[in-house]
Amino acid sequence: MTHAEFVTAYRRGDVKVEIDAKAAARHLSARLLLPFVAMPVLGIGVALAIIGWIYTGLAVIAAGVVVPRLIKRGAASFLLQQAIEDPKAFDTLVRANIMRLAPLPVHPQAPPTSNA
């Protein structure tokens, strides 16, 4: 399925999209380099706590722990939006088996019944 076919089918509701949440979190974490961002933030929080800015330091540490988790939790929906907007992201997610597509079965409409 091409990107254009996917977008059309998704908007019509003709395709079922399954995104592996754990794989999506790993993929987004790697793309955003979350560990390399979180470590310095945690270090800054510890440094602030040590020099006397205890509450500010604790708030920075909390942010350094909570924000990456929130990003990972929303990774599946973020990557779905990326796949809809960007053909390259769509191809990457399908090839990495993070996003799987399955066409929905087409149910023929029943003929209208008359109440006469």
Image: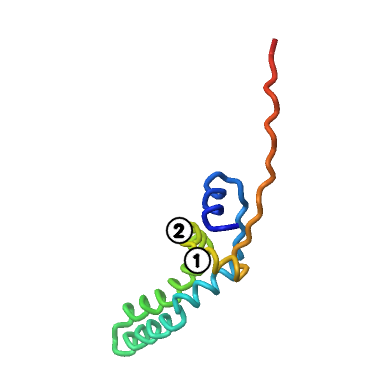
Q: Is residue 12 left or right of residue 55?
A: right
Q: Callout 1: 10 Å neighbours few (<14), some, many (20+)?
A: some
Q: Amino acid at mark 2?
A: Glu
State the image quarter where residue 99 is shown.
Answer: bottom right
The answer to whether 2 is drawn above or below residue 104 in the figure is below
**Quick check: 104 left or right of 85?**
right
Residue 8, image x, y percentages: 53, 48
Label 2: few (<14), some (14–19) or many (≥20) C-alpha neighbours in 10 Å: some
Question: Gap between marks 1 and 2, in whole Å?
Answer: 8 Å
Q: Is residue 35 left or right of residue 111?
A: left
Disc 1 marks which residue?
A: 89
Q: Which mark is residue 14?
A: none
Q: Secondary structure at mark 1?
A: helix
Along the line of sight, the residue nearer the viewer: 103 or 54: 103
Q: Residue at x 45, y 78 (%)?
A: 34
The spot of residue 89 in percent (x, y) is 50, 66
Residue positioned 56% across, 67% down in the render: 93
Front residue of 101/31: it is 101
Task: Give the image quarter of residue 59.
Answer: bottom left
Q: Residue furthest top?
A: 116
Quadrant containing the N terminus is: bottom right
Residue 115 percent location from the top left of the image: 69, 13
At x 58%, y 45%, the residue is 13
In contact (CB < 8 Å): disc 1 and disc 2? yes
Within the image, what quadrant is residue 25 found in?
A: bottom right
Residue, disc 2: 85
Q: Work out which quarter of the rendered image holds the C terminus and state it.
A: top right
Residue 53 to residue 66: above or below? below
Q: Nearer the viewer, residue 93 or 60?
A: 93
**Colour scheme employed for the rendering of this structure:** rainbow
